Amino acid sequence: MNTPVTHYDLLIQGGTVIDGTKAPRFNADVGIVNGRIVAIGQLAGHTADNTLDATGRIVAPGFIDSHTHDDQAVLSQAQMPFKVSQGVTTVVAGNCGISAAPLRVDMDLPMPLSLLETPAEGRFTTFAAYLDALRATPSSVNVAAMVGHSTLRAVVMSDLDRPATDAEISAMQALVEEAMQAGAIGLSTGTFYPPAVKATTEEIIEVGRPLTSRKALYVTHMRDESDRVMESLEETFQIGRALDIPVVVSHHKVQNTRNFGKTKVTLPFIKEAMQHQCIGLDCYPYTAGSTMIRTDRGMMEGRVLIASSVPHPECAGRDLKDIAAEWGVSGEEAAQRLQPGSAIYFMMDEDDVQRILAFDDTMIGSDGIPVGEKPHPRLWGTFPRVLGHYSRDVGLFPLETAVWKMTGLTARNFGLHERGALKPGYHADVVIFNAATVRDTANYETPTQPAEGIDAVIVNGAVTWQNGVHSGVQNGQVILRKDAAATV
Ligand code: ZN
Ligand code: CU
């Protein structure tokens, strides 16, 4: 409020502000000029080109989806209705070791890399080319992107079923360096997945060397989220210490019945480690996960719902058990025939999910997979589900905390400059919602339905979603790592 502006491009009037810092809500108007918030306060009598009435509504920073696989969707489904309709204005892409760049033009993509479809524009052979394409044709959301270790392995190695050689490590390192120079915010791994199962801790540390001088992030879908989850956490923290960089544990969970309740051990362990190094974690608000179709027994313990299948698209939305019975084969055999594809695995305990969500430092990330007609409902429902179901109905935490977990906390952990809070000078990413009615409507049967109670979504000052309708605006920006933004 240093400059005395009295005319705005957009004025949000009469709302209750939850500013994304966990501070208690307060009544205020919000004035926006040139894609930035310029004033928050009683702005009666001020004029604007466009006014939104937020009486009886919450005005909050646009939500940041800390864990997405939207790398290609931001180009091929650029209006991003599944995210914008939830109030999401920024996505972090390049998770679980998988990124859209760099790729070789001539290479075959192994699962799960092939889950991200190749865009019409073709493949990006450098990280810079990917970010350039996003800048040339912006999507409706802001994008901060990471480079994926499994993608680098597939680019560099002829055989993924072994640790990388020194020469391959150097080649991957050079690609990480290129991504860092282009403005990538970090490196992700997915050692749970076949392309990276054989990568050693040392390989990851060496590939990640270019992160250190930039204090860029190491983000991981850990090796094991089941019986060996503690060892996996320790490996993650070890990599963070070796590189002296912040780490993020992706979609923290403990899976399989025999491990139910283990969050009583993992969360205090994470809390303890946080005393000594920089650690973040995220979580999606469901007891089912979703990933590529697997045939290992551990994954088939609970209900398995097929989300998509290349050879059998007609099986999407059906239970693996029913498909196997119909075909007269075992579950493993049916799963094998359905590959490649993705499935939904019911393998977590509700108490664990709630314990992780309620943990102070847990961010909200959807892990949505924007492919096919029967995706996991988290793609469309994650954020309203936390606001409506978990905060309001279950009472897990106050609304101010829920908003913090999807804005301020996330912007801090990922280094997203001047976003994630409603403050003068910050980018005008804003969501207006009804605290009494906000709720997810996407479920396992009908997973592609927009949330209720999200009134308006503003991205860099532009109204992008209003009363259930996308405005067509594609005003998203590419968010570069802060030190790169100064030089690129
Ligand atoms: Zn993952
Ligand atoms: Cu993921």
Image (cartoon, rainbow, N blue to C red):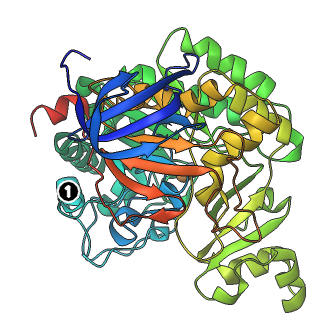
Q: Is residue 312 among the parts visible in the rendering?
A: no
Question: At 70% from the left edge and 78% from the top edge, which residue is drawn?
Answer: 336
Q: Is residue 38 left or right of residue 335?
A: left
Q: Residue at x 61, y 25 (%)?
A: 400
**Most foreground residue, 341 or 393:** 393
Label 1 sits on what residue type? Arg
348 versus 17 height, above or below: below
**Which residue is tagged 1?**
135
Q: Secondary structure at mark 1?
A: helix
Q: Is residue 481 above or below residue 445?
A: above
Q: Specify few, some or many for label 1: CA neighbours under 10 Å numbering under 14, 14-19, or 20 or more.
A: some
114 relative to 10 in the view: left or right: right
Is residue 112 shown above or below 487?
below
Between 411 and 467, the one nearer to me in the picture: 467
Quadrant showing the C terminus:
top left
- Horizontal side of 250 relative to 476 (left or right) equals right
Q: Position of residue 156 (x, y in %)?
A: 30, 59
Q: Is mark 1 within 8 Å of ligand 2?
A: no
Residue extending farthest to the left is 487
Query: What percent of the width, then of the height, locates residue 3?
Result: 18, 19
Q: Position of residue 332 (x, y in %)?
A: 78, 74
Quarter of the image for residue 343 reads bottom right
Q: Confirm whether residue 482 shows in the render.
A: yes
Image quarter (top left, top right, bottom left or bottom right) of the N terminus: top left
x 49%, y 26%: residue: 20
- Seen from the viewer's position, the closer of residues 285 and 390 is 390
Q: Across the whole image, how many numbered discs are drawn on residues?
A: 1
Point out the residue furthest to the top here.
275
Q: Is residue 76 above or below residue 455?
A: below
